[in-house]
Amino acid sequence: MKTVKVSNMDITPPKTTSGDFETPPMCIAGHCVVLCVGKRRSGKTTACTSLVEKMGFDYVIAVSATMASNKELMSRLNIQHEFDPDDPMVIDKIKEIVEGEAADLERYQEEMRRYRKLMKLIHSESPLFRLPEEDLAAFYRDGDFKPPEHRYNGRKPKIAVIFDDCLGSAVYSKPRKLNGLATYSRHVGQLKEGGAIGVSLFFLVQSYKCQSGGLNKVVRNQCTALMVFRTKDAAELDDIASSVAGEIDRPTFDRVYGAAIGDGEGHPFLLVDFARRPTHPSMFRRRLNEFIVL
């Protein structure tokens, strides 16, 4: 078999992609869809909280029926919105929040264009009567001209949504809206001039697959990173290994899982980063801070 290359048919990627944002160099990339799988008391909530902290999100939207029991841990995050997973409108409310951020950013950008134009006129030789009265009124405060304000100084906010203890709830049992959010999370809150605000999603589950009321295959297939905690359930490990077989063969999965979990002391977990950065030595980690290099 051979290939024949033709000219002028190269794929040209965009300079920026919808919803992407910078995270610290050793963190996973944003925006992400992260699935944390671990039994009760496995340490998944602590690990997920640490990851969200390190990624530098501006705020968190929490969807959980048990948030109060993790209040001390969750207080480390800037949780600005909390929703009940049985609320049938929860996904709509999340989208509304993000779309509101997009509208506020566009408001700021338009006001900045008006402000800069006004400042240019003021510093020119144009007489004052030619200045737009609406803009004079909008930007003159406390005896001086001041630029418009935006709580993120004109950049896109970084938003995380955490789904915790949602097994059997409406958000999982009737997943049509959740499937859409997981599939198009980077494109939520679209901007008129291109791009979007986007959201990162974190799902904390006790079982990778569940016959009823669990996280469905559509969402699982969208995950960009997987955190697998210690389990004695061989069938569950089979399910996880089978689902990632397109990226990792079974012998490799068994090797890295064994290396990550070890003797099970200290709540270890295997992190698989399917969208790893070229600067990272491996897509596998033991916890967050130790790469497993094959």
Image: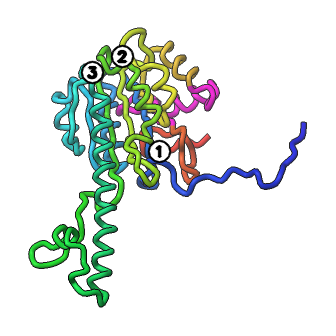
Q: Which-is-in-front pick, marks 3 and 1?
A: 3
Q: Residue at x 37, y 43 (%)?
A: 189
* Circles 3 and 2 in contact, beta carbons < 8 Å: yes
Residue 241 drawn at (x, y percent): 56, 23
Whichever of callouts 1 and 2 sits on the residue coming sooner in the sequence is: 2
Q: Amino acid at mark 1?
A: Glu
* Circles 1 and 2 in contact, beta carbons < 8 Å: no
Q: Which residue is mark 1?
A: 290
Residue 240 drawn at (x, y percent): 52, 22
Q: Residue at x 42, y 34 (%)?
A: 34
Q: Is residue 183 above or below residue 193?
A: above
Separation (CA) of disc 3 from disc 2: 9 Å
Give the residue furthest to the front: 129
Considering the numbered disc 3 on the image, is that residue within a helix, a strand or a loop?
loop
* Label number found at residue 232: none
**Quarter of the C terminus within the rendering:** top right
Query: Viewed as shown, does residue 17 lie left or right of 119?
Result: right
Give the residue furthest to the right: 1
Q: Which-is-in-front pick, marks 1 and 2?
A: 2
Q: Residue at x 32, y 36 (%)?
A: 95
Q: Is residue 113 above or below residue 254?
A: below
Q: Nearer the viewer, residue 110 or 265?
A: 110
The residue stretch that appears in magenta: 244-272
Q: Nearer the viewer, residue 233 or 126?
A: 126
Query: Viewed as shown, does residue 12 lie left or right of 162?
Result: right
Q: Which residue is mark 3?
A: 88
Q: Amino acid at mark 2?
A: Lys
**Quarter of the N terminus within the rendering:** top right
Q: Amino acid at mark 3?
A: Pro
Q: Which residue is mark 2?
A: 174
Is the residue marked by circle 2 packed among few (<14), some (14-19), or many (20+) residues within 10 Å?
some
**Magenta stretch contains residue 91:** no
